[in-house]
Image: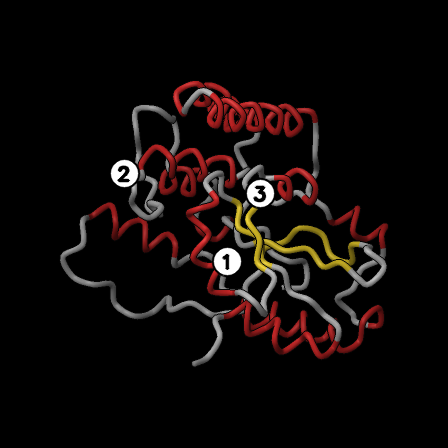
């Protein structure tokens, strides 16, 4: 049986001294546990239930990645990361609701960076600091996404919402998550986490459609369109 994407890449690169660590951002660790279990024991796979990687590295969507060298130094900032291509040409199934067709059509516009990104990772794994894709600390800082006061306030509101979600309940968290969305509208992890919790029935797998609700002003399809469409949904690596 072939290993799924990132797990297979980890197995391929481990002999070169490179470790691929995948991290799920989800307030409810149980949602990600099946993938963590499937990756064990060979592939390091974690759950970030507090969205710490969001705050430390600047992840604003998934999947994103940073590259860290053997000294613990970042050599690439937070960027969209993909190593498996997507089917964007096959006809959509017939009979789908109109909104599902619209959502899937917009999702197909998201740039497919898999081939180029995978090639860059392999180049860095083989050449280390001599790779053209490895940046200096100054270049990493220059290429990193800006973090202004609004981003800091958004992070604080989202964190407070997480605390209230765990200690009081979802309703207590909603005002703070709404504030986080307004303060940092480009942060899809804040939005999708809140939307999914609102639209997923109890005991069901996470809802990936994230349709409109009366609780939040936004939803996946309308917000993607407002941001310029699927073409602008990812933080494209500078080399692609």
Crowd band around label 2 with a 10 angstrom C-alpha radius: few (<14), some (14–19), many (20+): few
Pointers 3 and 2 in contact (C-beta within 8 Å): no
The N terminus: image quadrant? bottom left
User: Residue at label 2?
Assistant: 201
Inter-mark Cα distance, 1 to 2: 22 Å
Residue 141 image position (x, y, % from top left): 79, 46
User: Residue at label 3?
Assistant: 60
Q: Nearer the viewer, mark 3 or mark 2?
A: 2
Inter-mark Cα distance, 3 to 2: 25 Å
Secondary structure beneath dot 1 equals helix
As drawn, 109 above or below 182: below
User: Residue at label 1?
Assistant: 36
Q: Nearer the viewer, mark 1 or mark 2?
A: 1
* Residue furthest out toward the front: 41
As drawn, 161 above or below 223: above
Q: Identify the mark nearer the N-term, 3 or 2.
A: 3
Residue 155 image position (x, y, % from top left): 61, 29
**Relative horizontal placement of residue 213, taking residue 183 as reference (left or right):** left
Secondary structure beneath dot 3 equals loop
Q: Nearer the viewer, residue 207 or 38?
A: 38
């Amino acid at each position: 049986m072939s290993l799924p994407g990132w797990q297979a890449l980890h197995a391929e690169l481990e002999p070169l001294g490179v470790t691929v660590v995948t991290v799920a951002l989800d307030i409810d660790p149980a949602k990600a546990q099946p993938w963590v279990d499937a990756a064990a024991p060979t592939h390091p796979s974690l759950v970030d239930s507090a969205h710490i990687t969001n705050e430390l590295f600047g992840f604003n969507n998934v999947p994103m990645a940073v590259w860290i060298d053997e000294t613990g130094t970042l050599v690439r900032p937070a960027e969209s990361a993909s190593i498996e291509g997507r089917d964007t040409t096959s006809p959509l199934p017939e009979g789908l609701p109109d909104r599902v067709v619209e959502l899937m059509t917009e999702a197909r516009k998201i740039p497919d960076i898999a081939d180029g990104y995978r090639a860059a990772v392999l180049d860095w794994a083989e050449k280390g600091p001599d790779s053209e894709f490895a940046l200096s600390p100054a270049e990493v800082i220059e290429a990193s996404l800006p973090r202004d006061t609004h981003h800091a306030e958004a992070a604080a509101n989202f964190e407070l919402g997480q605390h209230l979600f765990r200690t009081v309940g979802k309703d207590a968290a909603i005002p703070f998550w709404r504030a986080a969305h307004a303060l940092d509208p480009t942060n899809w992890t804040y939005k999708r986490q809140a939307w999914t919790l609102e639209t997923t029935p109890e005991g069901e797998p996470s809802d990936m459609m994230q349709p409109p609700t009366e609780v939040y002003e936004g939803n996946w399809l309308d917000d993607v369109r407002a941001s310029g469409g699927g073409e602008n949904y990812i933080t494209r690596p500078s080399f692609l």
